[in-house]
């Protein structure tokens, strides 16, 4: 029998600054919302529409990236769907689907000239969950300096 798969990958922009809270046991919970724009053809015209997703990041990763997650920042999120169900006081069943992020990647430059909320030099290249949930540091790319002598 095949295993079930619950995986989500999104790239979008934050609709608000991230909020960081702690449980009674000290676990960090970072919450933010992402808007993902798409376009579809309706008749002869293209129509733009936005979808909004609530994202939650737990633990050290949430603490590490919270200060860089400011409104307008483009992020990539890799995670899984989680459905919360509850009953209202009127007895109506309600549910909401959110995303639990395993990896969050900061993309592009920070809005407002590249300054994070802490006043630093901008956002790191990316933060991933992994076992440590720690900061990876800036990502190297094709424009980086290479030594003059190439070994091949």
Image (spheres, rainbow, N blue to C red):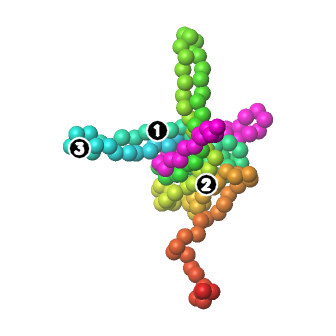
| 133, above or below 145, in the image | above
The residue labelled by disc 1 is 52
Number of residues whose C-alpha sits closer than 10 Å to that of mark 1, classed few (under 14), some (14–19) or many (20 or more) = some
| Nearer to us in this view, 40 or 23 | 40
The residue labelled by disc 3 is 45
The residue labelled by disc 2 is 118
Q: Give the spatial CA distance, label 2 vs label 3.
A: 43 Å
Q: Which residue is located at x 54 percent, y 20 percent?
A: 94
Q: Which residue is located at x 23 percent, y 44 percent?
A: 45
> The N terminus is located in which quarter?
top right
Q: Is residue 23 magenta?
A: yes
Q: Are marks 2 and 3 in contact (CB under 8 Å)?
A: no
Looking at the picture, how far across and down is residue 54, in whole percent? 54, 37
Looking at the picture, how far across and down is residue 93, in whole percent? 55, 17
Residue 119, visible in the rendered structure:
no
- In front: label 3 or label 1: 3
| 95, above or below 13, in the image | above
């Amino acid at each position: 029998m095949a295993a079930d798969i619950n995986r989500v990958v999104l790239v979008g922009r934050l609709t608000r600054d991230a909020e960081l809270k702690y449980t009674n046991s000290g676990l960090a919970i970072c919450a933010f919302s992402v808007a993902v724009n798409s376009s579809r053809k309706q008749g002869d015209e293209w129509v733009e529409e936005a979808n909004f997703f609530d994202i939650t990041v737990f633990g050290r990763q949430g603490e590490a990236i919270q200060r860089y997650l400011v409104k307008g920042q483009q992020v990539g999120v890799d995670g899984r769907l989680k459905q919360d169900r509850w009953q209202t006081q009127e007895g109506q069943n309600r549910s909401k689907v959110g995303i639990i992020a395993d990896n969050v990647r900061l993309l592009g430059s920070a809005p407002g000239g590249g300054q994070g909320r802490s006043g630093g030099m901008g956002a790191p290249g990316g933060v991933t969950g992994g076992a440590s949930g720690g900061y990876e540091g800036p990502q190297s790319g094709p424009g980086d300096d290479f030594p003059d002598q190439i070994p091949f």
